[in-house]
Image: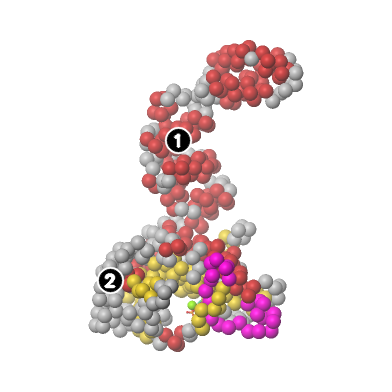
Amino acid sequence: MAEQYEAVIGLEIHAELLTESKMFCGCRVVDSVAATPNTAVCPVCLGMPGMLPVINRRAVEFALRVALALGCDIQPHNIFARKNYFYPDLPKGYQISQYELPIGRHGHLDVTLPGGETRRIGIRRVHMEEDTGKLTHLERGGSLVDYNRSGVPLLEIVSEPDIRSGEEARAYATRIRQILRYLGVNSGDMEKGVLRIEPNISLRPRGSQAFGTRTELKNLNSFRALAEGTDYELARQAAVLDAGGQVTQETRGWHDTRRETFSQRAKEEAEDYRYFAEPDLPPLTLDDNWIVTARAALPELPQAKEARYTGQLGLSPGEAAALADDRAVAEWFDAAVAAGGAPKTLANWILNDLFRLLNERGRRIDDIPVAPAALVALLDLVAQGALNLNSARDVLAEMLDSGRAPADIVAARGLTQISDEAALLALVEQTIADNPDALANYLGGKTALLGWFVGQVMRATRGQANPAVVNRLVAERLAARGPG
Ligand code: ADP
Ligand code: MG
Ligand code: ZN
């Protein structure tokens, strides 16, 4: 994009809430891909005349958690509003949403960019609404409509236009998704459409305060599409402006295989929706007690974990981010540290060996029979010299499969590391005596054979010798035979 422009980007993120039932009726929330269409519906979510909505308290609780986690001012007096428009997936002819008095306002999120720089992105509002049904357009013409999704609780998170590139948009959205998952309110499954991200994108001359005309991008089903689609749109707008043209305010789609945007429809203005207070719902009051309790119940969030891991525990930013990414992993690591493990060693073992073993077995860290303290016990055996690293890896695999304690496995398999110098020295002497050719070659200058001798001794002990001791003894005994 040309130097003379500054990118101005704001994101609207829609997240379906992981409640049991819908926003305003008792219908179950079902998997919108797997469930038989139109089986989780009732007169309320089908928009039958005269039906009365009732607010789902758990959905409000979830929305409150998110608003608090994003540092918003919480609105104690919530009003729901009718957003009027006609669409076949909206049987009532209006969507119940929040307009003037959303549950959260004036929040912010600190986002770490790939280069390590941190930027604060303002959160304009967090509001509750209901999802629409789902349309499937048939290739031979005609459309199908599934109302299972109609009335599913939906949270909209709207950022300030503080984002400056596709990469920043991706970093912001990734953080939001991570927080939603931490809070247990959304699965983050973009492929299934339970998390939908729509950037508003414009350019302005660098140094100008006024905003340019924006386009809004839809159909982004991955973070990659978000970053690429945003950058594509910025470049397209720059070309339009460079040619002396004007950007048209419109909604554009992202073509995932051609990797380009295309015009969908002219943008509606707020007045087109004729918002007014929803007459079928009373105002929703969040008392202080509710807000205070929800705030106190928030988990430590990923940004705070990362800062603690690098600041107090001495981990690298990469290790901290990898451990904090998933709440279950982070809490497992926290428990291991609390059990007395050395943070850096634990981080290495979790991110390398444990993750590999989990991947091989298709398991998750919160569904293994290994307690964090058991990994600490295993690493203690290594630190005491009772177990070498290779044996420890094997023991960890067996811990995962059997749930047995590390000391039991070591005893049962006779894996206790041999550190007894006298025994190892005898073995080293024996190995050198048994291999006169190798010794001659070594003495003739092939010094790399030192490692070969170490390997022979390790094999003779079935890997149980203390490698550091063996290395030292082999080097000493070979040096005693002549110049290496
Ligand atoms: P709506 O899209 O419903 O009209 P808003 O006007 O509140 O809602 O804006 C939605 C999003 O668009 C917000 O994230 C906001 O920051 C962003 N936005 C508003 N104006 C611009 C602009 N000129 N360029 C880029 N983003 C913008
Ligand atoms: Mg919009
Ligand atoms: Zn229903």
Q: Position of residue 332 (x, y in %)?
A: 43, 46
Q: Quadrant of the C terminus?
A: top right
- Image point (52%, 42%), residue name: 352
Q: Nearer the viewer, mark 2 or mark 1?
A: 2
- Residues at marks 2 and 1, CA–CA distance in whole angstroms: 48 Å
* Residue 41 marker: 2
Residue 3 versus residue 179: which sits nearer the camera? 3
Crowd class of label 2 (few under 14; some 14 to 19; many from 20; radius 10 Å): many
Residue 476 versus residue 449: which sits nearer the camera? 449
Is residue 58 in sight in this rendering?
A: no
Is residue 118 in sight in this rendering?
A: yes
Q: Label 1 amino acid?
A: Leu
Q: Label 2 amino acid?
A: Val
Crowd class of label 1 (few under 14; some 14 to 19; many from 20; radius 10 Å): many
- Residue 47, relative to residue 329: is it above or below? below
- Image point (50%, 68%), residue name: 220
* Residue 88 marker: none
- Residue 351, relative to residue 475: is it above or below? below
| Left/right of residue 387 with respect to residue 241 in the rendered view | left
Q: Position of residue 376 (x, y in %)?
A: 45, 37
Q: Position of residue 181 (x, y in %)?
A: 43, 59
Q: Secondary structure at mark 1?
A: helix
Q: Which residues are magenta?
A: 237-260
- Image point (70%, 73%), residue name: 2
Q: Position of residue 49 (x, y in %)?
A: 26, 83
Is the CB atom of the residue marked by disc 2 within 8 angstroms of ligand 3's nearest atom?
Answer: yes
Looking at this rendering, what residue extends furthest in the front direction?
140
Q: Secondary structure at mark 2?
A: loop
| Left/right of residue 15 with respect to residue 237 in the rendered view | left
482 drawn magenta: no
* Residue 396 marker: 1
